[in-house]
Image: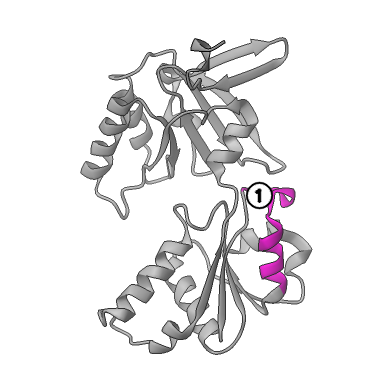
Amino acid sequence: MSKLYLVSAGPGDKDLVAPKAIKAIQNSSELVAYGLYLTLLGDVCDGKNHHDLPLGEEIERARLALTLAASGKTTSLISSGDIGIYAMATLVFELLDQQLNQSDIQSHPEWLTVDIEVVPGISAMQAGASRVGAMLGHDFCTISLSDLLTPWQTIEKRLHACGQGDFVVSFYNPRSQKRDWQINTARDILLQYRPASTPVLLGRQLTREDETITITTLDQLDAADVDMFTLVCVGNSESRHIINGSSQWIYTPRGYRKKL
């Protein structure tokens, strides 16, 4: 049976790529990805056929991976972080769903014969949390601030729900050249529900050579300090920022203090 691996490449550090992801790539002859991901993976991608499609061509990437796999070529479709979190896995299954419901303009019944295996990985929010301690130690959520695929009204509703539920929140797609106001709006909404002193993590290029980690507060969060390579994680009303000499940590307690 034809095989398609949906491979998670992790946040950038090769040491954080799961062994199962490495094995999937080694088993594949075709690698489909945004070129940067192949570069970060390094020599494990040597000797493979690279299909490098730029940002913005996600649908074409998913179609190509399915087509290559359906033709009998073992294929890996690769995303950074976890491929099931704001990444390519959901698009592959959406294309298959369209085929099953015959709602796709182009019919590709051969895609339905492909054996698909999803290989999980470490997401940006997990990598960021590990850099500062245990920020995701209690209930948390993720919200993408990109309104390219989701109406802003829906995103705003989720922001209020996050605030009312007092969730730690990791923001994906916080800012781009054309979207520079959403993160400040998100900040203002959360300030209605939690203290101005709430700790905030800004993790840019997490686990990569040019990584930067900044700890700030919710009232000081500003779009000028954020770009598309930055993960923004906002603590809940109980999250704590502690300083021990040159070390700084953020943790979100679960309630063990009552038992200590």
Q: Quadrant of residue 63?
A: bottom left
Q: Is residue 255 left or right of residue 38?
A: left
Q: Alpha-carbon neighbours of circle 1 within 10 Å: few (<14), some, or many (≥20)?
A: many
Q: Residue furthest left?
A: 153
Is residue 24 inside the magenta stretch? yes
Q: Is residue 162 left or right of residue 132?
A: left
Q: Amino acid at mark 1?
A: Gly
State the SS at label 1.
loop
Kindly identify the residue that appears in the image at 51 percent across and 86 percent down. Answer: 70
Is residue 129 inside the magenta stretch? no
Across and down, in percent, residue 106 comes to 33, 85
User: Nearest the camera: 69 or 226?
Assistant: 69
Q: Look at the picture and state if 72 lies above or below 243.
A: below
Q: Residues in magenta?
A: 11-26
| Secondary structure mostly taken by the magenta-highlighted segment of the chain | helix
Q: Quadrant of residue 6?
A: bottom right
